[in-house]
Amino acid sequence: MLNPDRPKWGGSVPPVAADYNHGMVFSRPSSEVAPRRVAVLGCTGSIGTSTLSVAEALPDRVQVVGLVCHSKCQLLAEQCHQFRPRVAVVTDRAAFDSLDRSAFPAETELKYGDDAVCELASGADVDVVLSAVVGAAGLAGTWAAIDAGKTVALANKESLVVGGPLVTELAAKRNAVLLPVDSEHSAIFQALTGHTAADVERVVLTASGGPFRGRTADELESVSPEQALKHPTWQMGPKITIDSATLMNKALEVIEARWLFNLKASQIDVIVHPESVVHSFVEFADGSVLAQCSPPDMRLPIQYALLYPHRVPGPAKRLNWKELNRWQFEQPDRATFPALELGFEVAARGGTCGAVLNAANEAAVGRFLDRQIGFLDIARCVRAVLGAHDFDPTPTLTTLLRLDGWARQEVARWTPPRTR
């Protein structure tokens, strides 16, 4: 489990990206050919099901030994029959109590709760933990895996948004490996391989722009949840889809990149690329720029994280060079989508800001989906709560967890302004 009583982080960030080819966090050179034994945390979500698609296509490379879901027990049972994992964990009490145990294979042990998630993530028969639980709830499993010195394929960006320096410090102490799954961070990682942090001038994350690219603030005041959930490029869960529409997802990715690659906030930028084929850029000190390109298919960065450093043919889509004509880039509209600016502010300030930003956003998105606040109220609410919290530059995990709960309570009490 999370240990809220660990000492305060008080030193400098460990050199997580000091050597992108043989660094502490990113490389564990290996000639192994045995299948990677993988536990999938968040197996019924979009990243989880894409991960299992990779496992299905590469059975000689990926062995699923554990699955975790929140409440979709019917889908979990189907996955268990296909992959025959040793253990399956359900984190919703009501769902676990009402599930049909006869629907699961006899060899799969069924367990409940966060303790079971952490036990699975730290198990001796697990090589790679794919952390894809949505939101701050994913931190517990990520933490347990890192504490056990595992390789973590990190799709749960909130682990670094909430506890960036604490997570990277623990990874350094435990010789754990963090491999990015987000397409943007995977692209940066791939471009950085073979280079050192001193080589990097800046990184540029690409953003699709979401469903409301080009809209004005006045047009967005009356946006419905149904409209916000229609992403033009990616198929994702509701929370991350709303975050993409507000550009909060890109704000969280800015914070993630700050800790994952040991960058300053000033070394990170964002550009809108509607086609979602160029996943990010790295600009080096000599002016050279490298980009990673592929169709918008999450199975590619997932496979790269699961099998790193090996590259083998897999199920991901390929670029059709005969159909390519042009790629479009434009600057993000930070005035209309103020959530993006919050990401840069939090990345620069650090401390407790990430935990408060993330919790407030999760709660505000929930209120929007429940039609209690408007689309533009999400960023307004998050900024208000962030500005009202008691900032601590070097928090303990106890402080971060306390402020997570506080921020959610503040969002529940927040009232949208009457005049706009």
Image (cartoon, rainbow, N blue to C red):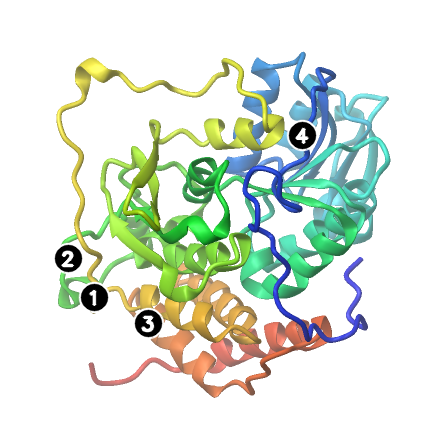
Q: Tell me the quarter of the image containing the C terminus.
A: bottom left
Calculate the distance from the C-alpha at mark 4 to the C-alpha at mark 3.
47 Å
Q: Tell me the quarter of the image containing the N terminus.
A: bottom right
Relative to 140, is 296 on the left or the right? left
Q: Residue at x 56, y 56 (%)?
A: 135
- SS for tag 1? loop
Mark 4 residue crowding within 10 angstroms, few (<14) / some (14–19) / many (20+): few
Task: Report the residue marked by disc 2.
Answer: 215
Q: Which tag, 2 or 1, sits closer to the chain's start?
A: 2
Q: Is residue 407 visible?
A: yes
Calculate the distance from the C-alpha at mark 3 to the C-alpha at mark 1.
12 Å
Q: Which tag, 4 or 3, sits closer to the chain's start?
A: 4
Calculate the distance from the C-alpha at mark 4 to the C-alpha at mark 2.
47 Å
Q: Quick check: 237 above or below 169?
A: above
- Disc nearest the viewer among 3 and 1: 1
- Disc nearest the viewer among 3 and 2: 2
Task: Report the residue marked by disc 4.
Answer: 29
- Disc nearest the viewer among 4 and 2: 4
Q: Residue at x 54, y 53 (%)?
A: 260
Q: Residue at x 58, y 80 (%)?
A: 393
- Disc nearest the viewer among 4 and 3: 4
Q: At which x and y percent is residue 106?
A: 85, 22
Task: Report the residue marked by disc 3.
Answer: 377
> Do tag 3 and tag 2 residues touch (Cβ < 8 Å)?
no
> Do tag 2 and tag 1 residues touch (Cβ < 8 Å)?
yes
Amino acid of disc 4: Pro
User: 77 and 298: which one is in front?
Assistant: 298
Q: Which tag, 3 or 1, sits closer to the chain's start?
A: 1
- SS for tag 3? helix
